[in-house]
Image (cartoon, grey):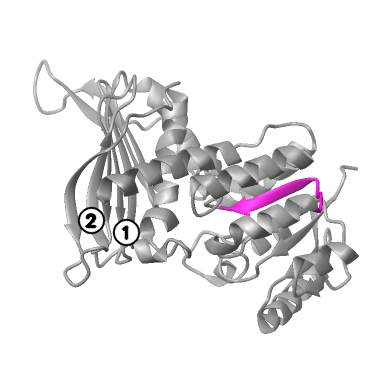
């Protein structure tokens, strides 16, 4: 029988727990739900500074465990701080799902407690300097850290990762983010409460992921166009395009809007023989085929050979990657080094915005 790994979760708020109740989202959509859904994991403890959230979390986990054959029938332990948790528990996997501003201190402490693996929510930290401290701590204690850049684990983006090598020379990548949240506010550097960090982390990381498939992950310094500042506070950025290039892709553009009245996340990859369009709720793949409209011409048409599953399994696959790593069967698919690469680009963009 396969070994069962114990896990704890630190931070039982939105991404840690409550997003698991969003009926419109693909489930599991929180760390708690993904851990509970994996038969190789036993969730033994939770930690949060909010006692009510902890109590609600414990009640739910206990109820779920009662109906789960694989889970422990004992109630999970709850703690108000990390030191107490590790004084009484020795989990194999420690999940850190606290707010961004607490990532650094929490990660440094948790790593020093020496679980077998740490799962850390993105971003690694608020900036490159702090992220490097996490990396240094990880190496000091020889504790691996898996970063939850969730799209790296999604089935649809894995299809894009593979298909990008079938569309000829990649001519352009367009990556777009739309929301009503301010893109950048210098006054929020200590909280990370701006979209360039909160959501832009995902957008930049997934483009770097696709570039890895082309063996061309290094990109140039950004050139900013289309800069829009807040009408009332000119220090707040509402929209911009950040333009880059790599050895194999001459035109890489990140368009981010913090003045939209909708949320959107899209990546388009245009090659000489095909195209990929992928984002929240859609994944489309196009190949060069004989035109139905013009004799002697070719056009791009949907590639029906690519089967896109209904579920992306983004959270489930992230947790499974942790299990496979501990089993010695797979490498981590999202590392602290990946997270630092993203933060470097974010910092380059911020410097160019000023």
SS class, disc 1: loop
Q: Over which residues does the magenta segment extend?
A: 113-121
Residue 129 lies within the magenta run: no
Image quadrant where one finds the N terminus = top right
Residue beneath label 2, please? 239
- Residue 306 has which mark? none
Q: Is residue 330 visible?
A: yes
Q: Quadrant of residue 273?
A: top left
The span from disc 1 to disc 2 (Cα, nearest Å) is: 7 Å
As displayed, is residue 142 above or below residue 123? above
Q: Residue at (60%, 71%) from the top-left corner?
A: 13
Q: Does the CB distance between marks 1 and 2 fall below 8 Å?
A: yes
Residue 233, given in percent of the width and then of the height, sits at 22, 69
As displayed, is residue 175 above or below residue 30? above
As displayed, is residue 65 above or below residue 294? below
- The reply, left or right, for residue 313 in relation to residue 293 is right
Residue beneath label 1, please? 183
Q: Quadrant of residue 287?
A: top left
Q: Residue at (87%, 57%) from the top-left corner?
A: 90
Residue 306, given in percent of the width and then of the height, sits at 42, 33
Residue 230, given in percent of the width and then of the height, sits at 20, 66
Residue 341, given in percent of the width and then of the height, sits at 48, 37
As displayed, is residue 103 above or below residue 46? above
Marks 1 and 2, the one that precedes in the sequence: 1
The answer to which of 108 and 47 lies nearer the viewer is 108
SS class, disc 2: strand
- The reply, left or right, for residue 184 in relation to residue 98 is left
């Amino acid at each position: 029988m396969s070994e069962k790994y114990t896990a704890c979760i630190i931070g039982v708020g939105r991404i840690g727990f409550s997003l698991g109740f969003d009926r419109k989202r693909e489930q599991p959509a929180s760390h708690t739900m993904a851990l509970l859904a994996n038969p190789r994991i036993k969730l033994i403890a939770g930690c949060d500074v909010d006692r009510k959230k902890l109590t609600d979390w414990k009640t739910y986990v206990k109820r779920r465990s009662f109906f789960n054959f694989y889970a422990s029938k004992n109630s999970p332990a709850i703690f108000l701080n990390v030191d107490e948790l590790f004084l009484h528990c020795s989990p194999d996997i420690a999940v850190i799902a606290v707010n961004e501003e607490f990532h650094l201190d929490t990660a440094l402490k948790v790593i020093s407690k020496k679980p077998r693996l740490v799962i850390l929510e993105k971003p690694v930290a608020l900036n490159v300097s702090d992220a490097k401290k996490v990396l240094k701590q990880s190496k000091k204690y020889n504790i691996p850290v898996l970063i939850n850049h969730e799209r790296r684990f999604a089935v649809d983006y894995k299809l894009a990762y593979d298909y990008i090598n079938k569309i000829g020379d990649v001519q352009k990548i367009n990556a777009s983010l739309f929301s009503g949240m301010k893109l950048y506010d210098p006054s929020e550097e200590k909280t990370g409460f701006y979209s360039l960090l909160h959501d832009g982390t995902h957008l930049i990381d997934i483009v770097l992921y696709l570039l890895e498939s082309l063996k061309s992950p290094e990109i140039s310094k950004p050139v900013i166009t289309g800069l829009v500042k807040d009408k009332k506070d000119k220090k707040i950025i509402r929209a911009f395009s950040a333009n880059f290039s790599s050895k194999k892709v001459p035109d890489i553009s990140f368009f981010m809007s913090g003045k939209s009245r909708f949320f959107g996340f899209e990546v388009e990859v245009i090659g000489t023989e095909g195209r990929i369009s992928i984002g929240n709720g859609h994944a489309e793949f196009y190949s060069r085929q004989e035109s139905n409209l013009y004799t002697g011409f070719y056009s791009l048409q949907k590639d029906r050979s690519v089967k896109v599953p209904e579920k992306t399994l983004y959270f489930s696959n992230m947790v499974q990657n942790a299990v496979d790593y501990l089993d010695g069967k797979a490498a981590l698919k999202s590392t602290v080094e990946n997270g630092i690469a993203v933060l470097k680009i974010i910092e380059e963009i911020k410097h160019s915005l000023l």
